[in-house]
Amino acid sequence: MNGIMQPLISYLNIEILLQRVAKTNDVVSGGNNENNDVGALTFMVFPPLQLLESKGYPRISSKTKMKGYTWNGTTMLIKILCFEMKMTEGSSSSATVDKKGESGFSSSSTAEEVTNGIDGSRLTAIVTGATGGIGAETARVLALRGVHVVMAVRNTEMCRKVKENILTETPDAKVDIMELDLSSQASVRDFATRYRSSGLPLHILINNAGVLAPKFTLSKDKTELHFATNHLGHFLLTNLLLETMKITCHEQKTEGKIINVSSEAHRLVLNPTFSDQINDKSSYNHIYAYGLSKLANILHAKELSRLLKEEGVDYITTNSLHPGVIVTDLFRNCSILSVIFNSVLKCVAKDVSQGAATTCYLALNPKVKGVSGEYFCDSNLVKPSSKAADPKLAKELWEFSLTLTTSK
Ligand SMILES: NC(=O)c1ccc[n+]([C@@H]2O[C@H](COP(=O)([O-])OP(=O)(O)OC[C@H]3O[C@@H](n4cnc5c(N)ncnc54)[C@H](OP(=O)(O)O)[C@@H]3O)[C@@H](O)[C@H]2O)c1
């Protein structure tokens, strides 16, 4: 289906879907309902709304913006998305706006483009969640640039296929698979022990793995699953491997990089607290829980950056990023989000090669040398929400995460 037909049909699909949801709930409350479809829509709609505004799309009045949480705001965004499709009608890949930022790259830049001509052959990187989606593409492009990539995954069998594909494309690629289940602290500790005893150096740690699970679930360590997997597992992993990275980078006089893959969904969390409240089933909402874990990714990178600077370790940087909206398996458990993705958003989403760009940019591009504690999108610096920039909250998260990961 070419030209305007596919976007048009997608638009009609989404309108029907939205109208159905509107009948059941007129205001997006972000409330505490496990099956809050409208909350799910907000998750998809609100962050892109802000992004589109930041890219110079017709400004939305403050009154309407306040209604980022209302049905009107949702409808408006869909119309803006259609506007975006129209702008890029006829383009062969994803329909994104090619407005270059300071880095010289844009939302349509691919991971290969942002690392073009860079030699990573002296570097070793760990990429978590490399069995598919953004993680697999990140591993592929880093390996293409000569980086020794260790894919840290819970499903090693599935990852073999990813490794085979990388080796088919780049026969001399250095790629390893190591088992890691981020939702289990025992598994994280076991991984770190095995990694350290392997004697491998560590220059780049990419905390990419993530879940979006609708049902309330506790991890093996009795922590809510989004928080346990997306934040806590990576927090512990980073702490356990930090010494290895320090030794590597100090000895080799290279810059170490810790990169957290977060999301614009962090903006959905307006009044965060990091306490045992995260494990309260009765107030659980999966969109909020996902957003909170993504907010934690940004705060974690910021606080670690601050601590490293305080310690005088200026050769390790830590940053976080939003990869864009990409059609991956992330939404497999959320029927309504899958519907949205398979209709209108598929036309405007990035493809996976663009989705891995900001991660690869932060990992290899010399333009970010010395930049630490920042948040990126489309390979450019972006301001996160005020909560994500709050040093007090970052400290609170750090203390809470230490409590949850100490002596388990
Ligand atoms: N796609 C988007 O539009 C989007 C937008 C914003 C942010 N992000 C972020 O981007 C990152 C990558 O997501 P994606 O879109 O590429 O999704 P994806 O295709 O579902 O990939 C997620 C990866 O995380 C792994 N994972 C999940 N739970 C794990 C655990 N307990 N231990 C180890 N690995 C685990 C998955 O492994 P299995 O194969 O074993 O499940 C998979 O490899 C996530 O952090 C996500 O929050 C994505």
Image (cartoon, rainbow, N blue to C red):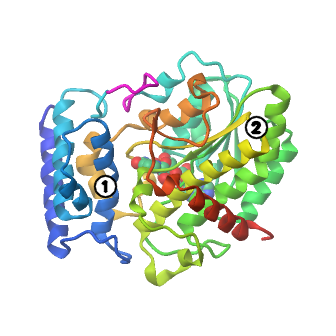
The reply to whether the magenta stretch includes residue 212 is no
**Which residue position holds label 1?**
46
Q: Main secondary structure of the magenta part?
A: loop
Locate residue 359 relative to residue 64 in the image: left or right.
Answer: right
Residue position marked by numbered label 2 in the rendering: 202
The residue range painted magenta reads 99-108
Q: Is residue 355 above or below residue 60?
A: above
The picture places residue 196, in percent across and down from the top left corner, at: 84, 46
For this rendering, which residue is in front, 389 or 343? 389
Q: Nearer the viewer, residue 29 or 345?
A: 29
Q: Nearer the viewer, mark 1 or mark 2?
A: 1
Q: Which mark is residue 247?
A: none
Residue 313 position (above or below residue 223): above
Q: Position of residue 230 (x, y in %)?
A: 57, 58
* Mark 2 Cα shell of 10 Å, populated few (<14), some (14-19), many (≥20): many
Does residue 32 sit above or below 379 in this rendering? Answer: below
The local secondary structure at tag 1 comes to helix
Q: x, y (%) of residue 245?
A: 78, 40
The image quadrant that residue 104 belongs to is: top left
